Structure formats: structure tokens, C-alpha cells
Image (cartoon, rainbow, N blue to C red):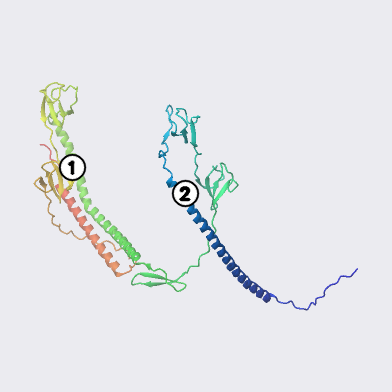
């Protein structure tokens, strides 16, 4: 037996770096591979070109021979005598099968979705031996039904489409079971999340243009953002402030006018109450005097509507066809006989039609208004108003003179000082608005006071009979 031998390697020998040699070898192999590939492609191309030329020459020779044979056959066909023309071919029109109907050989019918052709003249049903089946009825089609998000507690049928976790599935049979599963087919899977977008710049500061009311944002990278047009916003805010000031001023002025009116009307109300008491006393005295007077005269008979098969007594008054008649005797005959006397014949009445409309259809005695004046139509379908076909009823009156200005009322208590406005213009507009509103309310209060005084002056108690 020989003892095993071992190679001794010095432990201190350093490992050699082969990375540079491997890179050189890979580059050299790549160059050789490219050269071999190019030479192979050129050789194959040349060989294919030579073979293609050979095949092209052979095919051209065969094609030329076939063309010569075709010309010879055409010449022979021209020499043959022409036969009789055959009947034009066409398919019989399709009919609907009807029971107890005779169909002839070759007729084509449809029955229950199937198509049959008669093999002989027959009146039998299409499924007998007298018919040949051309096309059988197909199974009824079924379209997918979208059922929304998948719900385990719901029963699904074949071709039902559901959504689950962003994906869509279609059922392959009725009662397919849990989804996803073997009885469900994936239609569309949920897409992956997109890449995160670039980080947007933040607003570092603002540049304000006070003359044009424009605010431009300055971003963190020094660029400018989209400018903000603030003129309309400030204008609307200014209008809202003015509206609030006017509403507040109007409410204060209205309260002052109301208090003034109540103070002025209260004495008149007391006078009216006293007049009502006197009127009640005079009404009681009138009732006592009526008891001493003779009984009132007989009243006019009640007017009744005439109806057939009704007996009317002497003196009865009835209305018929717009006229009024009184019975001369007990009668059941219609008006026009000698049993009745005519008290009033039917006539036309005025019809108020409002403001005149040039496209309106007007009739005789229609009343309309033009520019504050009233006109009445003298005939049916009159001409434009005003004209000879219209009669003036009432013309528009002139504007009355303005009444004398009333005495100035007492000054109310001074209100609390409000917050300062944005500009002197707001203060000036507020004062002008308050003055105008106060002047209008005071004029209205004076007019109401004068109307109450006129009503009080004209009111007088009724006189009693002596």
C-alpha cells in the first residue's frame, strides 16, 4: 500500500486577479462571434439568391407551358357548338308553415325556429317524412349580466359578472360557489398602483398688486404661480357691506316712522271708537222707530229657472234663455205662448279684457286699457286701438300736485358708533342712503296722516227719521 500524497501550497502565496483576463476574453469572443455571424448571413443570403433564381426560371417555364395549354383549350371550346340555355336558378321564397295548408315540392317554410323544404306536395306537418330539415333552431342565446360587487349570500347564475377586490369575474355555470373559484373565470384583474408623481412646489410668499387687486403666489423654487384676480371678490364684499348698512338704516328709519305714525294715529283711533259708540246708539234708536212704522211693502217674487213638465202659477217669474218671463195664469207651457209676458230680453254685458294686445281677438263691448285710458269695442273684431272702432270710456288723469312738506319730527337718540369702513366713500354713501330712506319714510308717514284726517273729516253719523 502506498501512502496518500498531498500537494503542499504555501499559505503565504497571494491569489492572482483574473478579472482583467476574463474581460479581454469576453470582448475577443464577442468580436469573433460578430464576424462569424456576418459571414454566415452573407453566405446564406448568396445561397438563397442563387436558389431563388433557379426556382424562378423553373416556375416561369412551367407557367409558360400552362398558358400554352390554356390557350389550346380555349380554342377547342370555341369550336364546340353552344347548348340550349338552362333555366335561371333561384331559391323559392320562404313561407311560414300553417296547418291545413297544401305546400308543393320545393317550398321552403319556417316552423318553431326551424327551416324545412317540402320533398313532395304535402299538407302534413314539417316534422314528417314529407319534409327535409334545412336548418335547426339554435339554443336561446344568453348575454352576460352585471351583478355588481360580489356578495357571498347571493345566488348567481351562469354568465353573471361580479366585481371583487378591483377585479371582474364571470360565472361559468349556475350556482358557481365562492368567488374566486373553479367555477369563475377572471375577466379583468385589478391594475397595479402607479408611480408616485413628482413633488409639487409649495407657496413661499405672495406678491400683491394693490392697484389691480391681483395676488400672485411665489413658489419655493422662485417661479410664479397662477395669479388670483381679487377685484370682483372685493367688489362683492363692498356691495354686501353697503347692503347690510342700508338694511340696518332702513330698519331704524322704519321703526322711527312707525312710532311717529302710532303717535299721530292714536288720537284718530280714539275718535273712531267714539263715533262707533254713537253709531251703535243711533242704530238702537232706529230700531225703536222702525217698530212704530207701517209694515214694509211686499217683496219682488223670487226668480226661478224654467224647466219642462213643471207647473208654474200666476205671477211666477222664471228665467229662460237669458230672458225673464212672468206667468199670466197657471201653466206648464213654454215661453213664447200666450201664458207668459216677457219682462226682460237677453242682452250683452261689458267684458273687461285687461291691457290691450294687438294680437288679441276682441268682440263687441270688450273693454281694454291703453296707456292708462280705457276703451270699449263698438263691433266684433275691431281695428287697432285707439281707432273709430273703439269708444273712449275714461282717459288717463294728470299727475296731481305735490302736497306741502310736513313738520320735521323729533331727533331720535344717537346710536352706538359703528366700526370704521374701508374708505371715506363708504361713509359718505351710508349717510346719503340713510338720508334718502328717511326722507321717503317721512313723506309716506305724512301722506298716511293726511289720509287718516280726510277719512275722519268725512265720517258723520247717519241721520234718523223724524
Query: Where is mark 1, residue-wise?
Result: 278
Direction left: furthest residue: 388
Dot 1 or dot 2, earlier in sequence: 2
Foreground of the two, 13 or 80: 80
Q: Quadrant of the C terminus?
A: top left
Q: Is residue 334 visible?
A: yes
User: Within the image, what quadrant is residue 22 found in?
Assistant: bottom right
Specify few, some or many for label 2: CA neighbours under 10 Å numbering under 14, 14-19, or 20 or more: few
In the shown orientation, is residue 49 left or right of residue 299? right
Q: Quadrant of the N terminus?
A: bottom right
C-alpha distance separating marks 1 and 2:
140 Å
Where does the image place residue 129, in percent across and percent down from the top left?
A: 50, 29
Label number found at residue 96: none
Residue at horizontal 36 percent and vertical 72 percent from the top: 209
Where does the image place residue 358, in percent across and percent down from the top left?
A: 17, 48
User: Within the image, what quadrant is residue 12 found in?
Assistant: bottom right
Where does the image place residue 179, in percent across and percent down from the top left?
A: 58, 47
Q: Secondary structure at mark 1?
A: helix
Where does the image place residue 322, in percent across and percent down from the top left?
A: 15, 32
Foreground of the two, 170 or 87: 87
Direction right: furthest residue: 1
Residue at horizontal 57 percent and vertical 67 percent from the top: 46
Query: Where is mark 2, residue-wise?
Result: 73
Residue at horizontal 16 percent and vertical 29 percent from the top: 319
Q: Secondary structure at mark 2?
A: helix
Amino acid at each position: 500500500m502506498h501512502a496518500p500524497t498531498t500537494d503542499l501550497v504555501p499559505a503565504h502565496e497571494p491569489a492572482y486577479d483574473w478579472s482583467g483576463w476574463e474581460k479581454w476574453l469576453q470582448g475577443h469572443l464577442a468580436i469573433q462571434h460578430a464576424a462569424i455571424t456576418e459571414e454566415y448571413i452573407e453566405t446564406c443570403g448568396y445561397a438563397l439568391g442563387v436558389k431563388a433564381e433557379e426556382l424562378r426560371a423553373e416556375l416561369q417555364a412551367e407557367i409558360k407551358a400552362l398558358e400554352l395549354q390554356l390557350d389550346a383549350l380555349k380554342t377547342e371550346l370555341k369550336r364546340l357548338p353552344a347548348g340550349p340555355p338552362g333555366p335561371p336558378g333561384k331559391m323559392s321564397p320562404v313561407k311560414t308553415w300553417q296547418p291545413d295548408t297544401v305546400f308543393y315540392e320545393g317550398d321552403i317554410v319556417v316552423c318553431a325556429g326551424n327551416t324545412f323544404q317540402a320533398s313532395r306536395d304535402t299538407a302534413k306537418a314539417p316534422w314528417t317524412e314529407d319534409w327535409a330539415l334545412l336548418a335547426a333552431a339554435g339554443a336561446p342565446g344568453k348575454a352576460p349580466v352585471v351583478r355588481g360587487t360580489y356578495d357571498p349570500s347571493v345566488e348567481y347564475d351562469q354568465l353573471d359578472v361580479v366585481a371583487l377586490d378591483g377585479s371582474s369575474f364571470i360565472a361559468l355555470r349556475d350556482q358557481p360557489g365562492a368567488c374566486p373559484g373553479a367555477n369563475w373565470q377572471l375577466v379583468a384583474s385589478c391594475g397595479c398602483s402607479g408611480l408616485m408623481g413628482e413633488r409639487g412646489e409649495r407657496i413661499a410668499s405672495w406678491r400683491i398688486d394693490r392697484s389691480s387687486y391681483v395676488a400672485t403666489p411665489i413658489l419655493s423654487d422662485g417661479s410664479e404661480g397662477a395669479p388670483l384676480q381679487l377685484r370682483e371678490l372685493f367688489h362683492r364684499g363692498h356691495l354686501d357691506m353697503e347692503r347690510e348698512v342700508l338694511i340696518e338704516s332702513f330698519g331704524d328709519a322704519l321703526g322711527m316712522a312707525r312710532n311717529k305714525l302710532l303717535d299721530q294715529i292714536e288720537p284718530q283711533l280714539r275718535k273712531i271708537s267714539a263715533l262707533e259708540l254713537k253709531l251703535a246708539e243711533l242704530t238702537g234708536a232706529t230700531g225703536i222707530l222702525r217698530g212704530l212704522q207701517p209694515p214694509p211693502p211686499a217683496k219682488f217674487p223670487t226668480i226661478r229657472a224654467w224647466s219642462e213638465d213643471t207647473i208654474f202659477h200666476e205671477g211666477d217669474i222664471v228665467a229662460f234663455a237669458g230672458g225673464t218671463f212672468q206667468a199670466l195664469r197657471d201653466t206648464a207651457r213654454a215661453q213664447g205662448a200666450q201664458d207668459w209676458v216677457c219682462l226682460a230680453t237677453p242682452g250683452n254685458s261689458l267684458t273687461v279684457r285687461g291691457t290691450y294686445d294687438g294680437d288679441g281677438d276682441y268682440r263687441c263691448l270688450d273693454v281694454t286699457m291703453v296707456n292708462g285710458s280705457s276703451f270699449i269695442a263698438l263691433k266684433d273684431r275691431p281695428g287697432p286701438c285707439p281707432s273709430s272702432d273703439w269708444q273712449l270710456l275714461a282717459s288717463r288723469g294728470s299727475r296731481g300736485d305735490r302736497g306741502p312738506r310736513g313738520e320735521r319730527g323729533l331727533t331720535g337718540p344717537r346710536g352706538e358708533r359703528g366700526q370704521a369702513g374701508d374708505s371715506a366713500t363708504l361713509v359718505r354713501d351710508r349717510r346719503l342712503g340713510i338720508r334718502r330712506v328717511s326722507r321717503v319714510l317721512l313723506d309716506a308717514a305724512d301722506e298716511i296722516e293726511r289720509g287718516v284726517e280726510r277719512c275722519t273729516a268725512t265720517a258723520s253719523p247717519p241721520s234718523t227719521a223724524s
